[in-house]
Image (cartoon, rainbow, N blue to C red):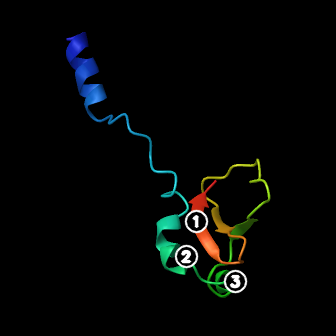
Amino acid sequence: MRGLLMVLLLAGCTGAAPSPDITCNAQNWQELIGEPEEALYATLGNLRVVRAGKPKPADVNPNRLNAEIDKDGRIARFGCY
């Protein structure tokens, strides 16, 4: 009986970690990739901008949207960290 209970409890577990970009909805902003940095400010309110050549901030908040800007000042990618 105990073995059956363990099987039932584990049946709902996939073992896969959630995608890191789902928590802050980074996938919703992919159309802005390649646009100038200024496009961020007209569209998004709560985000952190990470510029090329600068270290990524150490504080992690999977609910925060982060926009990475390339060396040319264009949006390179979005992520949740």
Compared to 27, does 41 lie above or below?
A: below
Depth check: give the residue in front, 56 or 63.
Answer: 56
Residue at the disc numbered 2 = 33
Q: Say which residue label 3 marks.
A: 41
Labelled pair 3, 2 in contact (Cβ < 8 Å):
no
Tag 1 secondary structure: strand
The x and y percentages for residue 8 are 23, 26
Q: In the picture provided, is 9 more to the left or to the right than 22? A: left
CA neighbours of label 1 inside 10 A, class few (<14), some (14 to 19), many (20+): many
Residue 13 is marked as none
Mark toward the viewer: 1 or 2: 2
Residue 60, x across and y down, in percent: 69, 49
Which numbered disc, 1 or 2, marks the residue that appears first in the sequence? 2
> Which residue is at 65% across, 81% downward?
40
Quarter of the figure with residue 78: bottom right
Mark 3, secondary structure of its residue: helix
Q: CA distance from mark 1 to mark 3?
A: 14 Å
Q: How busy is the neighbourhood of tag 2: few (under 14 within 10 Å), some, or many (20 plus)?
A: some
The amino acid marked with disc number 2 is Ile
Residues at discs 1 and 2 in contact (Cβ within 8 Å): yes
Give me the disc on residue 78. Answer: 1
Could you tell me which residue is drawn at 20 percent across and 17 percent down?
Answer: 4
